Image (cartoon, rainbow, N blue to C red):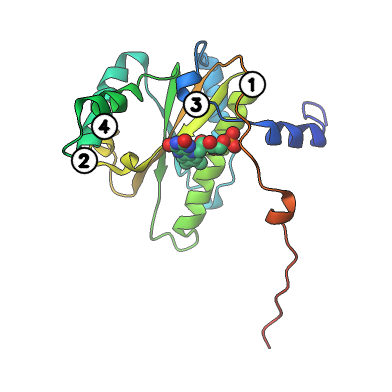
Amino acid sequence: MEGFLPMNDMVDRICARRSVSPKRLGPPGPSAEDLREIARAAAAAPDHGRLGPTRLVHVPDERREALAEAFAAAALEEDPQCDAARLEDARQRARNAPCLLAVIATITDDNPRVPPHEQWISVGASLQNVLLAAEALGYRAMAVSGRRVESRALRAAFGLGEGEHLATFVAVGSHDGEPKATPRRAPETVLEEWKGEMMP
Ligand SMILES: Cc1cc2nc3c(=O)[nH]c(=O)nc-3n(C[C@H](O)[C@H](O)[C@H](O)COP(=O)(O)O)c2cc1C
């Protein structure tokens, strides 16, 4: 099919995707046009009932310091004794990488047809599409979250209401070197034959 990679190339590309730590991501970050492509890929995830559970919030450069303060507040919330060095470390996480996206999940608990876990799966699929699209456009990326995404400080910073969650951040940028190859599970440990039986 025109415009499509041969299937085996596409599988190779998926398997070759590698995360690069935000600390190692440098310029350039994605252009506005590339960001739109990344959002288009996010919107292509499977989504039962077309609930649209995923939003991407781009943190502009001029708002990075405001986010840094929210990260510091989240660190203090987690540990009121947090010392100055760890607070600065928390702040630094908002400054790494040329592009920072927050992945916001809106999960409806009482949908009669689409249970919450299906909505979360859709958010995860959008996240994967974001990572794959970033690589396809020539960037490197990594999902970074941690317990602090559930903090009151970060929830307030993103104006989250009931049913909304800061699922993760995604850092996007450029990296020349070879990314660290974390081991992947062997296919045999992922795929098995069904051995169950029909209930009488
Ligand atoms: C939602 C989500 C959040 C993550 N948050 C972190 C994180 O905060 N810190 C971290 O070291 N890895 C985190 N990871 C894992 C990395 O993004 C990455 O997937 C892992 O290091 C494996 O590398 P690979 O993607 O190259 O296989 C997260 C993964 C997901 C899916």
Distance from Cα at disc 4 to Cα at disc 3: 23 Å
Residue 154 sits in quarter: top left
Q: Which mark is residue 79?
A: 2
- Tell me the amino acid under the disc marked 1: Glu
Looking at marks 1 and 4 on the same chain, the residue that comes earlier in the sequence is marked by 4
Whether ligand 1 has any atom under 8 Å from the Cβ at mark 3 is answered as yes
The residue where tag 4 is placed is 157
113 relative to 177 in the view: left or right: left
**Residue at the extreme bottom:** 200
- Residue type beneath disc 2: Asp
Q: Residues within 10 Å of mark 4 (few under 14, many from 20)?
A: some
Say what secondary structure mark 1 lies in.
Answer: loop
Do residues under tags 1 and 4 come within 8 Å of each other at their CB atoms? no
Choose the circle earlier in sequence order: 1 or 3. Answer: 3
- In the rendered view, does 65 fall on the left or right side of 195? left
Residue lying at 39% horizontally and 61% vertically, measured from the top left: 110
Q: In the rendering, at what x and y percent does residue 100 appear? A: 42, 24
Question: Closer to the observer: label 2 or label 4?
Answer: 2
- Mark 3 packing: few (<14 Cα in 10 Å), some, or many (20+)? many
| Residue for point 26% across, 29% down | 86
In the image, residue 1 sits, relative to residue 47, either above or below, namely above
Read off the residue under disc 1: 178
